[in-house]
């Protein structure tokens, strides 16, 4: 039976973008199911005392240069030629994440992620601007008015907050975080380990049953 990869996700994370764009090859090879769970990276940081690498490593000589080198290597290895750094970085994804949470599961949800990821990390747009986000959604054939209105509802806001708290409870301290059953993986560099675990016939590590 195909395994499920839970992806703790926020548009604000550049590495979440890179991982998401690389994952289709992995899921095609393994027939694994990808379950994207919208969460707020800022909420995860606040709950765990973590901070973004560009802040955490700012005072460490050579560390941020190496982070960018790893990004370039990943982009080249996975042929993510559309990627460009967003000039508005660090980006504000709150509205985009709320509207994603308002999406219906399936085609609308997937189309929303593709379009909004492109806006953030391929087109360099100011996606915190409601007018810009609405334009991107309309261009993708989505109902921008409905989604942006739903994003302001208490129900959607509470669901996103609950998703974030649940991710922290599972052990997440940043994005991208992945879970296969009870096994947690952090960072885009772990995709090889994830693939080994979700490959047909793979056994879950002892003491950690795969769900």
Image (spheres, rainbow, N blue to C red):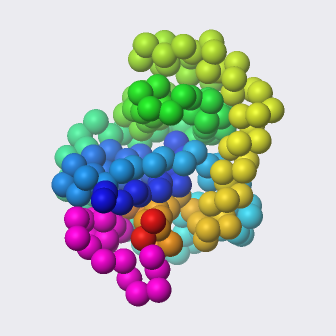
Question: Outermost residue, front direction?
Answer: 1
59 on left or right of 48: left
Task: Please tell me which residue lies in front, 18 or 162.
Answer: 162
Residue found 66% across the figure and 51% down from its top: 163
Query: Residue at left 61%, top 36%?
Result: 101
State whether residue 40 appears in this view.
yes
Q: Residue furthest bottom?
A: 206
Query: In this rendering, is residue 147 above or below 10?
Result: above
Asked if residue 25 lies left or right of residue 92, the reply is left
Q: How many badges with numbers are in the image?
A: 0
The image position of residue 12, as x and y in percent, is 55, 45
At 57% from the left and 33% from the top, the residue drawn is: 100
Q: What residue sits 61% from the left and 71% below the top?
A: 171
Give coordinates of residue 143: x percent, y percent: 54, 13
Q: Which residues are magenta?
A: 190-209
Q: Is residue 15 magenta?
A: no
Left or right: residue 172 compared with residue 121: right
**Looking at the figure, which quarter contains the C terminus?**
bottom left
Residue 66 higher or lower than 128, as above or below: below
- Quarter location, residue 193: bottom left
Q: Residue 11's spot in the image, x, y percent?
A: 52, 42
Coordinates of residue 137 in the picture (x, y in percent): 49, 18
Q: Is residue 6 above or below residue 140?
A: below
* Residue 90 visible in the current orientation: no
> Quadrant location of residue 129?
top right
Give whichever of 204, 161 is nearer the camera. Answer: 204
Could you tell me which quadrant the N terminus lies in?
A: bottom left
Which one is in front, 177 or 29? 29
């Amino acid at each position: 039976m195909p395994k499920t990869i839970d992806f703790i996700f926020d548009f604000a994370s550049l590495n979440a973008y890179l991982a998401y764009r690389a994952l289709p090859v992995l899921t095609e090879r393994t027939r694994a199911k990808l379950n994207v769970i919208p969460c707020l990276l800022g909420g995860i940081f606040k709950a765990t005392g973590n901070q973004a690498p560009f802040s955490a490593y700012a005072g460490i000589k050579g560390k941020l240069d190496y982070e960018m080198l790893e990004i370039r290597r990943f982009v080249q290895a996975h042929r993510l030629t559309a990627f460009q750094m967003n000039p508005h970085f660090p980006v504000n994804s709150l509205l985009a994440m709320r509207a994603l949470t308002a999406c219906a599961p399936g085609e609308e949800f997937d189309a929303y992620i593709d379009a909004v990821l492109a806006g953030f990390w391929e087109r360099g747009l100011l996606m915190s601007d409601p007018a810009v986000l609405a334009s991107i959604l309309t261009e993708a054939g989505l109902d921008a008015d409905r989604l942006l209105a739903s994003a302001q509802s208490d129900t959607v806001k509470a669901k996103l907050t609950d998703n974030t708290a649940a991710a922290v409870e599972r052990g997440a301290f940043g994005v991208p975080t992945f879970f296969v059953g009870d096994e947690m993986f952090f960072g885009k560099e772990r995709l090889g380990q994830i693939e080994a675990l979700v490959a047909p016939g793979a056994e879950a590590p002892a003491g950690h049953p795969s769900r």
